[in-house]
Image: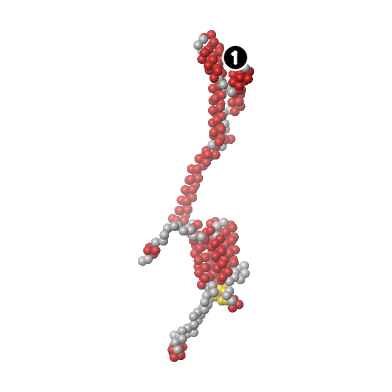
Amino acid sequence: SRRERGNISDRKARIETMASLKNMIRSWLDDTYPEMPVSQRESLANTMDVSLIERKKEDSIKHIYEINSVVRMSLIEMQFIKKELMNAMYAMDELMSSNEININLASVTPAVLLLYGANHTFKFLYYALLKLGKSREETYASFRLVLLDMERLLLMRSNPPLAPPPLTWGESSKKNLLSSPHFGPMIVDDSSTRANNGDVTVLKSDDLGMLMLHIHECRTILWRNRKRFTRQIIRDVSEDLSELAGERGPVSVQQQLQIMARMARTYPFLKVVSTGVALDISRFVQ
């Protein structure tokens, strides 16, 4: 940083050098051109213009008796060169200060790239080669598959139609069929019941137990891979799973399907993004 690096130039010495040069030029103008207007002499001294000194030196160096004037003008030129060096070092300080952020970024970039590559290499070794865990995509896919099984179960129990009545083939055929030892009474396994003889369908105990197993599997995935989800998503998904299980009050199959539709609509990790690659069905046909 700038504090650790320090400044190349001495700013106080630069200011003193410029003040000394102005005084030297002003004094030389007062001695050499006393007839020049004071305002013009002040202007040349304040701007540290040495062009008049250069021209006068060219004329004076031809005469040996003006050697003292030549030495004086040479000293003024040396002071001018010193001032220019001070200004150059000051400009370098300003340039380095303005580019300090770029320099820091350039020094950090190799370390960032190295950490990025090491992170991806570690993930590849951890998930692909060593099989020590699941990646983020695999975790999300497992959660989606469990929700798919839950949705299949609920769809099959959502107000299913009654079983069709048995076919009638006449009285004789019916008596022969009833007297057959292989014939038994038709059992309609309606795994869902209609509450209050209405259109509201609730799961029976067997299907409810299966649903609870799926919910437990979702909670297990959510807990074991909690680093893959944000705290807000964990809290919201846990609340949705509690509603699906009926822990927040009785729910019908239709309500459970609506809860699952809300989950698929709300959480980004439940959405499957297409890769744009067409599926080649011929690979799956033997």
Quadrant, the C terminus? bottom left
Tell which of 15 and 262 is nearer to you: 262
Q: Position of residue 46 (x, y in %)?
A: 60, 22
Look at 52% across and 61% down and name the residue there.
270
Q: For this view, does 280 lie left or right of residue 54?
A: left
| Residue type at the position of mark 1 | Tyr
Q: Position of residue 248 (x, y in %)?
A: 62, 67
Q: Is residue 205 visible?
A: no
- According to the picture, the residue beneath numbered tag 1 turns out to be 33
In the image, farthest residue toward the left? 286
**Quadrant of res 241:** bottom right
Count of numbered circles on the image: 1
Please rate how many residues cluster around mark 1, counting C-alpha atoms within 10 Å: few if below 14, some from 14 to 19, many from 20.
few
Q: Position of residue 33 (x, y in %)?
A: 59, 14
In the image, farthest residue toward the top? 65
- Note whether 134 is above or below 215 in the view shown: above
- Note whether 259 is above or below 132 in the view shown: below
Disc 1 element: loop
Look at 57% across and 31% down and name the residue there.
7
- Note whether 210 is above or below 22 in the view shown: below
Look at 39% across and 63% down and name the residue there.
281
Tell which of 94 and 57 is nearer to you: 57
In the image, farthest residue toward the right? 38
Q: Position of residue 178 (x, y in %)?
A: 46, 88
Tell which of 23 and 46 is nearer to you: 46
Quadrant, the N terminus? top right
- Note whether 131 is above or below 54 in the view shown: below
Look at 53% across and 70% down and name the residue there.
154
